[in-house]
Amino acid sequence: MTGLLVTGAFAVSGVALLYAAHWLLVPWRSVVRTVPYQSGWVPETHALSRYHVRWYLATLLFLAFDVEMLFMYPWAVVVADLGASAVTEMFVFLGALMVAVAWAWREGALRWV
């Protein structure tokens, strides 16, 4: 119980120390504080500007392939132990992802012009 209290005290004092360092080191009355910027460059567009809808379709396509890889790595480790049922389940899963890819293709996610 004592170790938990000591760890909690260190965590709280560490956070308090970081907040104090931030308060002391940040230039409070600077233009840099009021303008959103990235890497020191003045922004060319507003921070809340909208993205073109084609990027949402590209994101869905990326997620389809990303989720596919997320499930294929652990599957590759256990497929030899599970046998034909694991292969069948993976083909069903890949079929569902191919439906998502076909939909994205139909919507124009693969066209960049």
Image (cartoon, grey):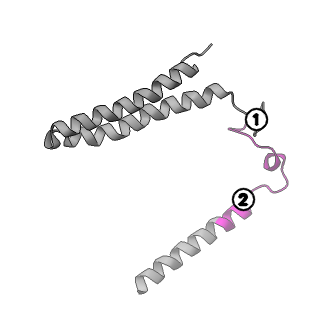
Magenta residues? 19-42
Q: Determine whether label 2 and label 1 are within 8 Å by CB.
A: no
Residue where numbered disc 1 is placed: 49
User: Which residue reaches farthest top?
Assistant: 113
Residue bearing mark 2: 25
- Given residues 35 and 93, the one toward you in this image is 93
Residue 84's quadrant in the figure?
A: top left
* Residue drawn where x is 57% and y is 15% of the image: 111
Residue sitting nearer the eye, 91 or 52: 91
Q: Is residue 33 above or below residue 107?
A: below
- Residue 29, given in percent of the width and then of the height, sits at 85, 54
Residue 9 percent across, percent down from the top left: 53, 79
In the rendered image, the vertical position of residue 57 relative to residue 67, given as above or below? above
| Residue name at image x 52 percent, y 25 percent | 104
Look at the image and say whether residue 49 sits in the magenta stretch. no
Q: Is residue 77 left or right of residue 24?
A: left
